[in-house]
Image: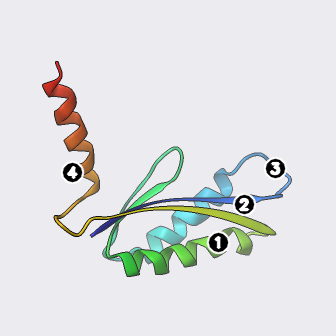
Amino acid sequence: MAVVEISIVPLGTGNTSLSPYVAACEKELREHAAGLKYELTAMGTIIEGDLDQILKLIRRLHEVPFNSGAKRVSTSIKIDDRRDSSSSIEQKVKSVENKLKSDT
């Protein structure tokens, strides 16, 4: 299972606000993320699941700003594809929190 962080940014839109584009991407994600777990954060979106399925979804999400009038889109993708054991969004956060508790 992979954990993927994506950030999709339209460029040259004439406006500094990105929230309409983020909302459009989030709507597309909700409609097409069957079987995937995802979490919207202040700086991007984290998706958990099958890597092939996630990559297909990212390709679809990359098109959303273009469909909303953007002429250029920059998509950043960070992939954590661990194959020696299972990994999840919650497990990754819990692991760090446990280490913080043991330091006190």
Q: Which residue is mark 3?
A: 15
Q: Position of residue 48 (x, y in %)?
A: 33, 65
Secondary structure beneath dot 4 equals helix
Quadrant in the rendering for residue 94? top left
The mark nearer the N terminus, 2 or 1, is 2
Quadrant placement of the C terminus: top left
Q: Which residue is mark 2?
A: 10
Q: Residue furthest top?
A: 104
Q: Amino acid at mark 2?
A: Pro
Q: Amino acid at mark 3?
A: Asn
Q: Residue visible at 72% across and 60% down?
A: 10
The numbered mark at residue 64 is 1
Real-space Cα separation, disc 3 to disc 4, in angstroms: 38 Å
Q: Amino acid at mark 4?
A: Gln
Mark 2 and mark 1 residues within 8 Å of each other at the beta carbon: no
The mark nearer the N terminus, 3 or 2, is 2
Name the front one of labels 3 and 4. Answer: 4
Real-space Cα separation, disc 4 to disc 1, in angstroms: 31 Å
Q: Position of residue 71 (x, y in %)?
A: 81, 69
Closest to the observer, 17 or 74:
74
Name the front one of labels 2 and 1. Answer: 2
The mark nearer the N terminus, 4 or 2, is 2
Q: Residue visible at 42% across and 74% down?
A: 54
Q: Amino acid at mark 1?
A: Val
The numbered mark at residue 43 is none
> In this rendering, would 53 be left or right of 25?
left
Real-space Cα separation, disc 3 to disc 1, in angstroms: 17 Å
Q: Position of residue 69 (x, y in %)?
A: 79, 69
